[in-house]
Structures are given as structure tokens and as C-alpha cells.
Image (cartoon, grey):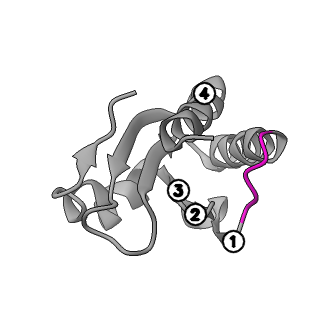
Amino acid sequence: MELIEKVKLINKAIDDRKGYNVKNLDVSGVSPMCDAFVIASGSNKNQLNAICDAVEEICRDNGMPLREREGRAEGGWILLDYSDIIVHIFSSEMRNFYNLDHTWKDAKTLSL
């Protein structure tokens, strides 16, 4: 499956759980760790968990194995590592605090 197709699936899962402020970044030219970041926000810990569960389910169902999961909804940041894509699910406060959108400003936005 192509990278764009994987990112679209992840975006669908996020959208299905009403995640918002989704950014899809091509970090292949600026980071050795993966090819893309998907960054999304949720309103509360229940929504963060629901978004995380939906992403894990759609990825598992489409043959994308989860390499590692870090963080917890209670901490406001969940990271899902799918090797070529890293998904960041944030509360609004933690997203503002870590400001990955600015940190990775040199990355191109993936057009879906």
C-alpha cells in the first residue's frame, strides 16, 4: 500500500472520531525516522482514546502493524509508530506546548 493511501486511512479513522486540526506532513526529506507525520487533536481524554483505538483498528485491518505505542490520553499525547508513518494524537494544550507544527515547519504538507 502506498504512503498516501495509508495516510488517507489514518485520516478517515481520525475524522470518524471527530478529531480535528489534522496535519499530514511529508518528513522524508527532513527526518530519518519516518516518511510522514499525521498530527491530530482531540477535545478530551475519552476522545483521544477513541481516536487512538480507531487508528489502531483501521491500520490493523489493513495490514499496517503497530511498531510502538507511547503516551497516554491522561498525559495529553499519544504516539503511534507505524514505521513509515508516526501518528501524534494531542490534547489542545499539549499540542500547543510541544508545537510540532512549528518544529517540523520545513516539512511539506502531504496533499491527499
| Category of crowding for the residue at label 1, using alpha-carbon neighbours closer than 10 angstroms: few (below 14), some (14–19), many (at least 20) | few
Q: Position of residue 13 (x, y in %)?
A: 65, 32
Give the vertical position of 59 relative to 81 (above or below).
Answer: above
**How far, Cα to Cα, is label 1 from label 4?**
21 Å
Report which residue position mark 4 lands on.
12
Looking at the figure, which quarter contains the N terminus?
top right
Q: Tell me the amino acid under the disc marked 1.
A: Glu
| Tag 1 residue | 68
Mark 3 belongs to which amino acid? Ile
Magenta region, mostly helix, strand or loop? loop
Q: Residues within 10 Å of mark 3 (few under 14, many from 20)?
A: many
Of labels 3 and 4, the one closer to you: 3
Q: Is residue 16 magenta?
A: no
Say whether disc 2 or disc 1 marks the residue closer to the N-terminus.
1
Amino acid carrying mark 2 in the image: Leu
Tell me the magenta residue range.
62-66
What amino acid is found at the position of numbered circle 4 in the picture? Lys
x and y percentages locating residue 86 in the rendered image:
52, 59
Q: Which residue is found at the position 53% from the left and 60% from the top?
A: 84
Drawn side of residue 46 relative to residue 95, left or right: right
Give the percent coordinates (x, y) of residue 91.
49, 51
Write the residue at 33% across / 30% down. 111
Would you name the residue on which mark 2 appears?
Answer: 79
Q: Which residue is mark 3?
A: 85
Residue furthest to the left in view is 106
Find out whether the residues at labels 2 and 1 contact each other: C-beta distance under 8 Å.
Answer: yes
> Circle 3 sits in a helix, a strand or a loop, which is it?
strand
Mark 4 and mark 2 lie on one chain; the one further toward the N terminus is 4
Disc 2: CA contacts within 10 A as few (<14), some (14-19) or many (>=20): some
